[in-house]
Amino acid sequence: MTIELEKHYNKFCEDKRLTRRHGQVEYITSMKYIHECLENMTDVKILDVGAGTGRYSVQLANEGYDVTAIELVKYNLGILKSKKSTVNAMQGTALDLSRFEDNTFDMTLVFGPMYHLYKQEDKVKALEEAKRVTKVGGVILVAYIMNEYSIITHGFKGNNMKECIETGKITEDFHSVSEPEDLYDYVRIEDINGLNEEVGLRRLKLIAADGPANYMRPVLNAMDEETFELFVKYHLTTCERPELLGASSHTLDILIK
């Protein structure tokens, strides 16, 4: 799995993903809720697990926060370090945060790992580690990619549905089945709820991080700036609505220890 991820991110420009318009929606939304969580905190220590190229960790460090970043992929880590921020960045995995003591961080971000962990026990382990290193009363923000986005875009829009059913990549109730070579894993809200229950984490909010943005890439790219700002305003107004959560391509789970 590690080798496959290395190959993927050596070709995929993660640094630019969140600067494109559909990615901007996800980034703006996530930062809004990060800042909401930080409002009443002082002397904050933040851990960014699976930090990628540092889109979040570098910005938070530039805002004056004490940020530590863990990234598995050397290529991404190199880009993060090249930004010359105050982020304490190091290579590591979400499954083993043993270099950190219990109750160390006020906020822990887990924005990348759950995309790539397809085994239930690994997802549980990543959440348990995030919980362990977070202080009591601290917050853990976890990002997921949602199942219905995969079904609609890769399955139906990409015209792969019949093949996926024949090869067992999709169950009878249309839940995608991921293997290591697939790189990405897709979940439903009940899957997320089950993880939280198993690890013993309480939800503050579940957010549609990008709502319909990923489905609308050409439309967003064609918008003038004023219309795009209206779309972002619409999204931020509706991103907590429960009827829209499962259809979002990404969700952001905000949890408290």
Image (cartoon, helix red, strand yellow):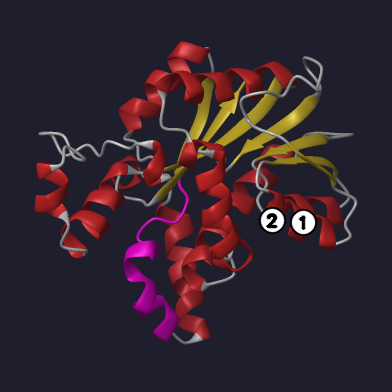
Lateral position of residue 114 relative to residue 77, left or right: left
What amino acid type should be assigned to the residue bearing mark 1?
Gly
Does residue 228 sit above or below 28 in this rendering? Answer: below
Lateral position of residue 146 relative to residue 233, left or right: left
Majority secondary structure in the magenta region: helix
As rendered, which of 223 and 77 lies closer to the eye?
A: 77
Q: Residue at x 29, y 50 (%)?
A: 150
Q: In the rendered image, is residue 29 in sight?
A: no
Q: Start and end of the magenta stretch? A: 208-222
Does residue 171 sit above or below 122 in this rendering? Answer: below
Residue 188 placement (x, y as % from top left): 31, 35
Does residue 171 sit above or below 55 in this rendering? Answer: above
Q: Tell me the quarter of the picture where residue 118 sits.
A: top left
Q: Is residue 209 magenta?
A: yes
Q: Is residue 54 magenta?
A: no
Residue 191 placement (x, y as % from top left): 34, 27
What amino acid type should be assigned to the residue bearing mark 2?
Tyr
| Numbered badge on residue 188 | none
Q: Which residue is mark 1?
A: 78
Tell me the distance, in whole angstroms, between the alpha carbons under discs 1 and 2: 5 Å
Q: Are marks 1 and 2 in contact (CB under 8 Å)?
A: yes
Q: Which residue is mark 2?
A: 75
Does residue 168 sit above or below 228 in this rendering? Answer: above
* Quadrant into which the C terminus falls: top right
